[in-house]
Amino acid sequence: SFYPTQYLTNQPVMSRVALEKVNQLIAANQVMVFSKSYCPYCKRAKDALKQVRAHFQVVELDQVPDGQDMQDALLAKTKQRTVPNIFVEQKHLGGCDDLLAAIASNELQNIIDPSRKGRR
């Protein structure tokens, strides 16, 4: 065949590696934020997480060599191209507005601190 086999699968080899990396980061961290250092919504999300004393990990996609591949992998995984792209307890939360809504409703705090359950 004319095309190398890597193009016959759903994803090129490189993005499979990136997807694996993304999945490992999500699995290893209670709150995982994929961000870009210059993005005002990312800064707002990170500031909000600090305010509720969440332990979170950040990858600045504009500052890592495989950031574009990771962003492509996130798009394939979540159908969301924008940053911040936030995961809580391995579940996709969404972006900044989704995070702020989860904080306003105490949903996030109840997840990150189970001893709070039921409290407002």
Image (cartoon, rainbow, N blue to C red):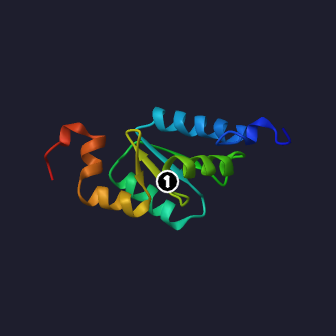
Identify whether 30 is placed above or below 103.
above
Query: Which element is circle 1 on?
Result: strand
- Is 12 positioned to the left or the right of 77 in the image? right
Give me the residue at 23% from left, 53% from top.
106
Give me the residue at 86% from left, 42% from top.
2
Residue 7 occupies quadrant: top right
Q: Residue furthest right?
A: 2
Q: Residue furthest front?
A: 1
Give me the residue at 60% from left, 36% from top.
21
Identify whether 35 is placed above or below 28.
below
Which residue has dot 1 on it? 85
- Is 14 positioned to the left or the right of 120 in the image? right
Q: How far across and how far down the image is residue 110, in percent?
A: 24, 45
Residue 111 occupies quadrant: top left
Front residue (pair 89, 44): 89
- Is 6 positioned to the left or the right of 75 in the image? right
Q: How far across and how far down the image is residue 79, in percent?
A: 51, 54
CA neighbours of label 1 inside 10 A, class few (<14), some (14 to 19), many (20+): many
Pick the quarter of the image with the N terminus: top right
Identify whether 11 is placed above or below 38.
above
Q: How far across and how far down the image is residue 93, in percent?
A: 39, 51
Task: Name which residue type carries label 1.
Answer: Asn
Front residue (pair 118, 6): 6
Give me the residue at 37% from left, 39% from top.
89
